[in-house]
Image (cartoon, helix red, strand yellow):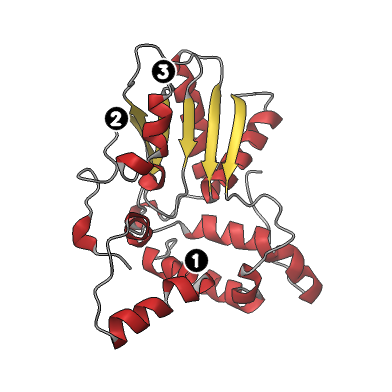
Amino acid sequence: MSDESAFEPGGNLATTPGDVVFENEVMQLLQYRPATAQVHVRPLLIVPPCINKYYILDLQPENSFVAYAVAQGYTVFLVSWRNAQAEQSSLSWDDYVEHGVLEALTLAAEIGRADSVNALGFCIGGTLLACALAVAKARGQEPVASVTLLTTMLDFHNTGELGLLVDEVSVRSREATIGHRGLLQGRELAQVFSALRANDLIWPYVINGYLKGQAPPAFDLLYWNSDTTNPLADGLLVSAQCLFGESFADTRWHGPVRSAC
């Protein structure tokens, strides 16, 4: 989709200076270095999707949200999810909520010496953040002062275009094929997202690449999009059940809907 030789994470992508301040089985927590003489009292924690690499909001300097936030005087923390391998196949959605989001919220507040943080969730990272905040609320905790969600699904009644690609049979097939090994290869999930926008993400490359022999142009966003990770099967199956469990109920769907929230 992009000229892969044109980009390198740490070279011309994801270059905002920062450090890993914590890591566990599911994530690393990055803290970006301040760029202003004074910083805001309350830090910002960013929770990106766990189905892609962390640097979607820190591409090149001119389009990096992270660099912009740091320049505005925010102490920015960002969760970098682990690229799951066979050793992590027993981890669950609940582990991502508890040891990913909730632990990151606590650490960001402690390191930032604040009573609460501002939180931003993107895509399924926003869904994880919302689940984590629901769990925190049930425990009588309020770890955030504000929440911003970008392209995040919370209301699972209307599946949108995904409903055209997923039905009870496909979910059960996925349970059988990935449930036993606990992982889904990142390239398989990337094919699903490409199919959602086939006119943009499939056919131009068939026409220009295969038929015309043209090399793809350099495009940082599509480079990131193709830099896949292996998501946990548990998280995907929980999401699928949340997405389609209720609609399947009308067609004798009896799969459990299990989640920390």
Residue matched to label 3: 111
In what element is the residue under mark 1? loop
Q: Where on the picture, by quarter, is residue 150?
A: top right
Residue 214 percent across, percent down from the top left:
25, 78
Mark 1 Cα-neighbour bin, 10 Å: few <14, some 14–19, many ≥20: some
Looking at the image, the residue that sits furthest to the bottom is 211
Which mark is first along the chain, 1 or 3?
3
Residue shown at the point (32%, 59%) measured from the top left: 219
Q: Decide which of tag 3 and tag 2 comes sooner along the chain.
A: 2
Depth check: give the residue in front, 170 or 218: 218
* Residue name at image x 54 percent, y 23 percent: 117
- For the residue labelled by badge 2, is the local secondary structure a helix, a strand or a loop? strand
- Distance Cα–Cα, label 2 vs label 1: 36 Å
Residues marked 3 and 2 touching at CB (< 8 Å): no
Upstream in the sequence, badge 2 or badge 1? 2
Evaluate whether residue 177 shows in this view.
no
Of tags 2 and 1, the one toward the viewer is 2
Residue 179's tag is: 1
Q: Is residue 85 visible?
A: yes
Residue indicated by mark 2: 18
Q: Nearer the viewer, mark 3 or mark 1?
A: 3
Answer above or below: position of 149 versus 238.
above
Task: Compute the Cα span from label 3 to label 2.
Answer: 14 Å
Please, what is the three-letter code of the amino acid marked with disc 3? Ile
Quadrant of the drawing holding the C terminus:
top right
| Residue under the image location 53 percent in, 59 percent down | 236
Q: Give the CA separation, mark 3 to mark 1.
A: 38 Å
Residue type, mark 2 in image:
Gly
Image quarter where the N terminus lies is bottom left
Q: Is residue 45 left or right of residue 133?
A: left
At 51% across and 36% down in the image, what residue appears?
A: 101
Q: Position of residue 200 (x, y in %)?
A: 46, 71
